[in-house]
Structures are given as structure tokens and as C-alpha cells.
Amino acid sequence: MVVSPIVVILALYACGTAGRDPATTEAPACEFDSCAETPSEPDGLACCIDAHGYGIEDADNLERLATSCQAEECDAGRYLSAAAAVCIAQSCGLPLGIGSCYARFEFGSSGPRWAVDNETEICDDDHLCGGGDILRVQAETGACSEIGAWLN
């Protein structure tokens, strides 16, 4: 059986999401951003950036940046805000889902990016169930890539 790298990444990601507390997420009640309704992806990107701007504010996302950055890369103001990332992901086709949506900053070998999740399945006990869609947004330019799914 051949396993693609995206399947492995999503499987590893799913293992890291167990027990996530919705109260600590970027957007506890995910709403569809009006910028995502623009006629084209470039229009949506421009609208999202104008509406939500730059700057990482969440303490967990700032910590993720600080543990991986060097020199000018450490300036949180050079990266899109979490709200802009969620908006951009929606304009690139990430569905609304049925629950919360999340934007998690990542800084790794592929550069700075946001992982934006929605929930398409919510569980009462928050253990070994739940899932949704995920889309990655480049943190400096807003380019969308790697749409997939996650399971808890």
C-alpha cells in the first residue's frame, strides 16, 4: 500500500488535536466572512487583508513563532492575523463547517503559514471523535494550499 505524504501529515496532525479546548481557539463560533463572497480569489485575499490586517496576537501562536524564528522572522507584525487567515481560507474554498474554526500559526521547513481548520463533526465528550477540513495559508502572502481533512 502506498501512502501519500499528505495522508501522513494529516494523520500526524490529527494525533495532535485530541482534547482541544474550543474555548481557547481563534474563533469560537465560526462565521462566514463577507470577504469570502467576492467574485475571485485575488479579490477575496485583498478584502481579507484590508479587513483584518497583519499581526499575531494570540499567546500560543506567538510562542510557536518564537520557538522557530530567527532575526527579522520574529517580527509578529509581518504575518497575517489569524482572522485574516480564516477569511482567506474561506475565500479559497474552506467550508464553514458546523462548529468552531481555528487558525494555528506554524513556522517550519515550508516557511511561516497558518493552518485553518473547521469542524464538520462535533462530539459531546471530545474524545476520539470529531473532524473537519483543513487548509494552509502562507502567512506572509496569503497564498492557499494543501486542503485536506482532519480526524480526532
Image (cartoon, grey):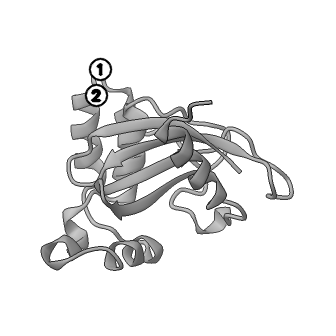
Q: Is residue 34 visible?
A: no
**Inter-mark Cα distance, 1 to 2:** 7 Å
Q: Is residue 61 left or right of residue 125?
A: left
Q: Residue at 63% of width from left, 41% of height from top?
A: 132
Secondary element type, mark 2: helix
Q: Which mark is residue 2?
A: none
Secondary element type, mark 1: loop
Marks 1 and 2 close (CB-CB < 8 Å): no
Give the mark toward the camera: 1 or 2: 2
- According to the picture, the residue beneath numbered tag 1 turns out to be 39
Please say if 77 is above or below 29.
below
* Residue at the limit of the structure toward the left, as seen here: 72
> Foreground residue, 50 or 150?
150
Please say if 139 is above or below 69.
above
Where residue 62 appears, as percent x and y from the top left, is 37, 75
* Residue at the limit of the structure toward the right, as seen here: 125
- According to the picture, the residue beneath numbered tag 2 turns out to be 41
Question: How many numbered markers are drawn?
Answer: 2
Disc 2 residue crowd, few under 14, some 14–19, many 20+, Cα 10 Å: many
Q: Residue at 63% of width from left, 52% of height from top?
A: 14
Q: Residue at 28% of width from left, 28% of height from top?
A: 41
Type of amino acid at the residue the image marks with label 2: Glu
Please identify the quarter of the rendering in which residue 67 is found: bottom left
* Residue at the limit of the structure toward the front, as seen here: 1
Where residue 63 appears, as percent x and y from the top left, is 40, 78
> Foreground residue, 11 or 43?
11
Q: Is residue 40 visible?
A: yes
Q: Is residue 143 left or right of residue 25?
A: left
Where residue 69 appears, as percent x and y from the top left, is 26, 74
Type of amino acid at the residue the image marks with label 1: Pro
